[in-house]
Structures are given as C-alpha cells and as structure tokens.
Amino acid sequence: MAYENIIAEKKGAVGLVTLNRPQALNALCAALIAELEEALDAFEADDEIGAIVITGSEKAFAAGADIKEMKDKSYMDVYQQDFITKGWGRLATCRKPTIAAVSGFALGGGCELAMMADMIIAADSAKFGQPEITIGTIPGSGGTQRLTRFTGKSMAMYMCLTGEFIDAETALRSGLVAKVLPAAELLDEALRIAAKVAGFSRPTTMMCKEAVNRAYETTLAEGILFERRVFHSTFSTEDQKEGMSAFAEKRKPEWKNR
Ligand code: DAK
C-alpha cells in the first residue's frame, strides 16, 4: 500500500500505520486523514490482521490538525462542509484492537487521535496537550470529552484551558497512558503487545473491547448487564471451549477464531 502521508505495513498479524509528514510534525491534513481512513479500512477487512498499531516519528506523534489548512475557513465553510469530520473518527470505530504508540508531541487533534485508540503507550519523551485555546479555538475531535473521561475534570480543564503540555509520567499518573518506555523501545513494545492481543481469539478480543468501550457510553448497571450478556455469548464460541479445555488439559489453546 503506497501513501504520501502515512506508511502502512503488515508486521505478521499486526497492521502498523506510521504517520509520515515529518516536515509538518505529522500535522493531520485532509490528505493524511483520508489515507489513514483507507489504511484502517484495509486492515479491518484483512483476515490476517488481528490488531493495529498507529505511531508517528520520534519528534512527533502528531502536532494536531493542519492549522495552515484551516486558518482561513469561514463558519459557513466549516459548518456546511461538516469540516474535517469524515475520516477523523475512523480509529475510534475500529473493531479490531488498536494501540497508539506516542513519541514526542501529541497535540490537539494528535492527542485526540491517540485517545481514540484502545490504549496509548508512550515514550518518555511524549508530550500531550490540547493547545487549541492558544490559537483561538477549542478541541474539536473529542478532546473535551475523551480527555475528561481519562484524566478527570481537573487535569482536563488544566490542559484545555491553559494549553500547557503534560509529560509522559504525568500522563501515566493521570490514566491517559498505559505504559511509559524509553523512546528506543516504544515501537517494539507496541508491536509486542499488539501481536499478543492478535494471538488471542479474534472474536473474543472484539467482544472484550466492545464491553470495555461500553463503560464510556452507559450507566454502571447497564454496562454490567451488557458485559454479562457478552460474557454469556462467549460460551457459544468454539474458542471458549478450546481455551478452557486447553487449560484443563495443560496445553496451549489453538484458536479457531470462531
Ligand atoms: N499545523 C500545521 N503545521 C504545523 C503544525 C500544525 N498543527 N504543527 C507544526 N507545524 C509545522 C510548523 O509550522 C513548521 O513548519 P515550517 O515553518 O517549517 O514550514 C514545522 O511544522 C515544524 O514546527 P515548529 O518549527 O513549530 O517546531 P517546534 O519544535 O519549534 O515546535 C510545536 C513544535 C509542536 C510546539 C509547534 O509546532 C506547535 O505549537 N504546533 C502547533 C500545535 C497546535 O496548536 N496544535 C493544535 C492544532 S488545532 C476536528 C478534528 C481535529 C481538530 C479539530 C476538529 N473535527 C473532527 C471537527 C483539531 C484541531 C487541532 O489540532
């Protein structure tokens, strides 16, 4: 798959997307988002792929939406075109498990893109921020909502109202990222985690992420009920029988993805 603003490649059962617009710190221009949507569609449709990693460069995961591309648009331009909506949420709608591996800047739309992944792992150099306030606007791709759910109100308000960045350790403490590593180890670790997830029963990983994501959409009682029903439904799969039998027989399970 040849693209201009990203690199999409397969690493075994893992689909790897590398944002690749170094001259603009991976600013998320419309062409990049269109390519990202296409690459994610392709990995979602590919039976060989069981998990997806999205990463950037060492200096920047992504420094946000492309400010130069949007600075002169009028309200009517952005409202009538539903500006930069198409493709922007694609990562959040992936059914296969996704990991954002963040090194350097993850700002504005870059931070929002990372938060659409199922988990974020970060290099110790990572800097997360929602600096839209400093350019006269507010987060537009979920920053006020997802960040608040990750970190709670105070940290989200601090980041959105001051535009100041937080470092990787603060992001870890705040629940925004799952793990922090030296930059040189980031991609290998992201690929290791993704390969591990891709090595489990595919339908079960999809059900599992659906259940976790439900926690963001519903009440506790409804979420628990949803989880219970999905848990019950795993007993209709061949892989639940295989997984539990393999445990009892002291052998490794052979997943059928059915
Ligand atoms: N857009 C365009 N170009 C950018 C950019 C950006 N966001 N960030 C960096 N660049 C470009 C710089 O202009 C510069 O280009 P040249 O001057 O060399 O041509 C090049 O990348 C290198 O940047 P710097 O020279 O500035 O590098 P520094 O190391 O000095 O500074 C920095 C790094 C990341 C601190 C700085 O570049 C910076 O502050 N960048 C802007 C960060 C920012 O404000 N991001 C938020 C943008 S607003 C929505 C979806 C998404 C969004 C909204 C709605 N919908 C779905 C509706 C998102 C909005 C945003 O993200």
Image (cartoon, rainbow, N blue to C red):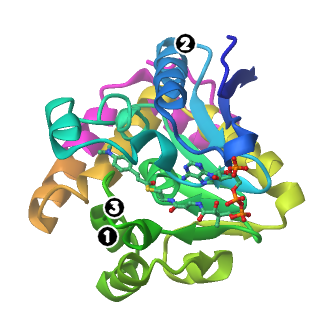
In this rendering, is residue 16 above or below 140?
above
Q: Is label 3's Cβ within 8 Å of ligand 1?
A: yes
| Within-10-Å neighbours for mark 2: few <14, some 14–19, many 20+ | few
Q: Earlier in the sequence, mark 2 or mark 1?
A: 2
Task: Kindly identify the residue that appears in the image at 83 percent across and 61 percent down.
Answer: 183
Label 3, residues with CA under 10 Å away: few <14, some 14-19, many ≥20: some
Which residue is nearer to you in this view: 205 or 92?
A: 92
Residue plotted at (18% across, 57% down): 223
Badge 3 marks a residue whose secondary structure is: loop
Residue 138: image location, x then y, percent: 31, 65
Which span is picked out in magenta?
Answer: 229-258
| Membership of 179 in magenta stretch | no
Q: CA distance from mark 2 to mark 3?
A: 35 Å
Q: Which residue is mark 2?
A: 47
User: Label 1: which residue?
Assistant: 149
Residue at point 58%, 59% (across, down): 106
Could you tell me the amino acid type at mark 1?
Answer: Arg
Quarter of the picture for ligand 1? bottom right
